[in-house]
Amino acid sequence: MDRFHHDSARAKADDSSSIADGVSLSRRRYSQGGPPGNDSIELERINTYRVQQQLTVGSRGSRIPQDQWLPIGAGKPYPPPLPDSEAYVVEFEGADDPMHPHNWPMKKRVMLGSLLTSCALVTAYGSAVFATAASGAEKEFGFGEEVAALGTTLYVLGFSAGPTVWAPSSELLGRRWPLLLGMFGFDLFMIATATAKDTQTLMLCRFFAGFCAASIIALVPASLSDVFNNHQRGVAIAMYTMSVFTGPFTAPFIGGYTASSYLGWRWTLYVPAIVGFFCLALIVFFTTETYAPIILVQKAAILRRQTRNWGIHARQDELEIDFKELVTKNLARPFLILFTEPIAFLLTLYMSFIYGLAYALLEAYPIIFEGTYGMTGGTAGLPFIGLIIGEIAGSTFVLSLSGRYSRKLAANNYVAVPEWRLPPCIVGGAVFAGGLFWFGWTGWNSNIHWMAPTAAGVAVGFGLTSIFMQCFNYILDTYSKFAASAFAANTMMRSMVGAVFPLFTRQMFNNLGIQWAGTLLGCIAVVMIPIPLMFYLFGGRLRQKSKLAPVMDLMPPAEEDIKEA
């Protein structure tokens, strides 16, 4: 029995040392010589999952006293522990192991990425579509414009609350089950919203629809990171970013035409639910688990059956889940990252403003194109196409630089320097601010053609996508071992801001006037332009001082990069 206690204590000690080793691993390699080769980078990424499980899920040592252990039964004594437990642990064969998601056939990975980004598009669409149903709901239930705006606000607040559940679930159960449950919940609550008989039910179901949709918004980037390496991930994140913003901007004209037709306002909510069920079916039949620790659990189960050796297991099987520790690690760490890491805080602040503005535009566009230009129904939503065109242009701009990024990555032995991501973000920030001034000073007077503020949307969409794509990639590169927590913190804060903006946008534009409200937003955007510039110039130094951001790169960002961008 003493041996059991000894092994438990040793496992706990191993946990503590491996966590410390994981945080400082990159710094040790930095100080020991040149960067590792490509295979070593992939192997290190694979081995990082060992540490990541303990950092995000639980620990290997048992917390249950021996006198509380369950008996084996039939009077049998406890068997001795495995002679060398490490020999029974299932691992990947190496960087080229076909079971590792990075080595899956490209066709499979592209199909998986396309399906997941389509799900993100549908759930993001659901966030904005209620604005087109609001007038019909107002007449039926008798509430005003402020209450109608809550339909969007509560959904986006669900985005903020959801990651606190879905992020730890994905570390414990893998990505697939939380994605399935979240998509199913989104579909059910969208139908419940469409069939609501009173205001309370309507608003409550909107919140829970957003809460469930948060599983898609929060976990799709993690899933894309699971299956695409640094060289390929830029395109995948571009598609995700496009889906997150194209969804809300297509809702005004699709939902507008639906609400003004014989179908009525309730069908604006049925449509995303129906499409969501279709996406759910595709996830069920055409996706597999992407989270490496869970893949190893599945591999271990197969090996146990094949070899009849029941000691074979994955490291995930060794973990003992403690609710207190689970809550502490998964709830406290996002806030720890957010409020102790200058990179995470300032980037999240910047992205939160951009995200909030995206939802503010859902209120501002009707003020301009319905109020100033007299458009109605779905026609009033067509100017959002300018924003979508801008998003496509922004994605094209960023992806056009991916070849240059790949060459720099290869020259640095495939060690990513996060600051290489930022030049397009800096350019996008300037274009974004200019688009806001353009939008405000061309949309206030009906004597100015409606194409002028619509064209301003191209600049706004270009900047919005350029900023978000590269900020997402920068966060992934900077907090690689803590990506789930970093994204959870980012999603929670920007969703809170996005939820608040629609509540005061209409009043701000009505009281200040369109031109001065646009000027105010443009000035705030100008003030925030230096944030990515500061990280481009000084991000490497900040990462060296960080306890959570590994420093694997040896090449500082070249000063001429920003000039070339």
Image (spheres, grey):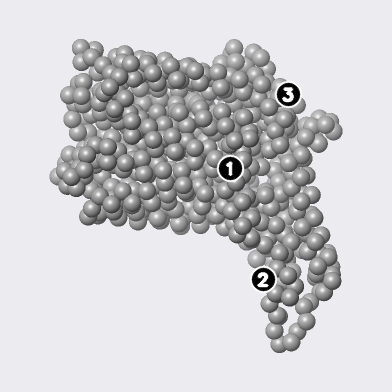
Between disc 1 and disc 2, whose residue precedes?
Answer: 2
Q: CA distance from mark 2 to mark 3?
A: 48 Å
Height in image: 553 above or below 557? below
Q: Which mark is residue 305?
A: 2
Which is nearer the eye, 246 or 106? 246
Q: CA distance from mark 1 to mark 2?
A: 39 Å
Residue of label 1: 334
Q: Residue at x 20, y 15 (%)?
A: 446
Residue 261 in picture, x, y percent from top left: 16, 41
User: Under tag 1, what secondary structure?
Assistant: helix
What's under tag 3, amino acid-wise?
Answer: Met
What's under tag 1, amino acid-wise?
Answer: Pro
In what quadrant of the picture does the C terminus appear? top right
Q: Residue at x 43, y 23 (%)?
A: 462
Q: Is residue 288 left or right of residue 303?
A: left
Which is nearer the eye, 252 or 292? 252
Residue 155 in picture, x, y percent from top left: 37, 44
Q: CA distance from mark 3 to mark 1?
A: 29 Å
User: Under tag 2, what secondary structure?
Assistant: helix
